[in-house]
Amino acid sequence: MRSVTWFRRPWRLFAEASALLIAVVVAFPLYWMVLSAFKPAGEIESSEPRPWTAAPSLDSFRRVFEQNEFGRYFLNSLVVACSVVIVSALIAFLAATAVTRFRFRFRTTLLIMFLVAQMVPVEALTIPLFFLMRDFGQLNTLGSLILPHIAFSLPFAIWMLRGFVKAVPEALEEAAYIDGASRSRFLWQILFPLVFPGLVATSVFSFISAWNDFLFAKSFIISDTSQSTLPMALLVFYKPDEPDWGGVMAASTVMTIPVLIFFVLVQRRLVSGLGGAVKD
């Protein structure tokens, strides 16, 4: 017994050390971003960078918040991300319920098409989407950012929610019908709360994708800067001749804060959503 314990302990220590090393590697760019945001301009441009600063400064953040359009960019990003999360979650929930609970022709084909849609690179569809948005008169509007992100987030969300809906016992549905519940009541009062952890998990990915989007914002918002989002605000501080790296890092830090807040708010639901589903 002692030999087995001795054999397992080194492997456990190795696994813990590896996990710690991976965490440090992943967190170091975030640390460097925040550090550079607080560094004065002289330290950022120094030829001998140091992983600390003796004179933290808020000048970079001051330049960020002094930008006249920064507040509008922040609000636009919030509108786009929240719209994508809410609409895609509702559509994905209804679609996952349909493909799981109902039998109809081409159901398997439809599910395969969802997977194929995930394999197509976003960059390959940007130009067709540009002409599509132009024909619908959606260029230079937030709708040109909301609609593509909803379309790209739905396949993943439907596939993930399908497992949660399938995990809900059919006996529970039959019992609800016997007790007099209608289909809509079962859908929203019983099934929806049970699969809500899965909705939270998919919403996190949808939120991050919409919040950090630069490709669509750069391609579809051409002339009306009042419809730009936060990733476009980084271009204000990046100039080919004299890039303001402090401003870029400060703006990136401010962009990261809403994502962290979102993670904190949905942390428990996210863990349960990624870890499993419903038990009979």
Image (spheres, rainbow, N blue to C red):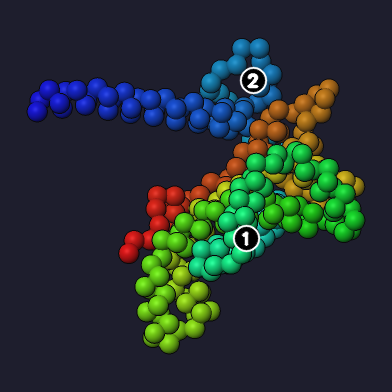
Q: Residues within 10 Å of mark 1 (few under 14, many from 20)?
A: few
Residue 21 numbered mark, or none = none
Earlier in the chain: of badge 2 and badge 1, it is 2
Q: Is residue 10 above or below residue 223?
A: above
Amino acid residing under circle 2: Glu
Q: Is residue 70 visible?
A: no
At horizontal 32% and vertical 64% (from top left) the residue drawn is 280
At horizontal 50% and vertical 74% (from top left) the residue drawn is 187
Out of 106 and 72, give the one closest to the viewer: 106
CA–CA distance in space, label 2 to label 1? 61 Å
Q: Position of residue 144 (x, y in %)?
A: 79, 54
Q: Is residue 27 left or right of residue 168?
A: right
Q: Is residue 193 above or below residue 79?
A: below
Amino acid residing under circle 1: Phe
Q: Residues within 10 Å of mark 2 (few under 14, many from 20)?
A: some
Task: Give the residue at mark 1.
Answer: 106
Q: Is residue 189 above or below residue 9?
A: below
The quarter of the picture where residue 98 lies is: bottom right
The quarter of the picture where residue 17 lies is: top left
Out of 153 and 175, give the one closest to the viewer: 175
Q: Is residue 162 visible?
A: yes
At horizontal 69% and vertical 54% (from top left) the residue drawn is 151
Task: Give the residue at mark 2.
Answer: 43
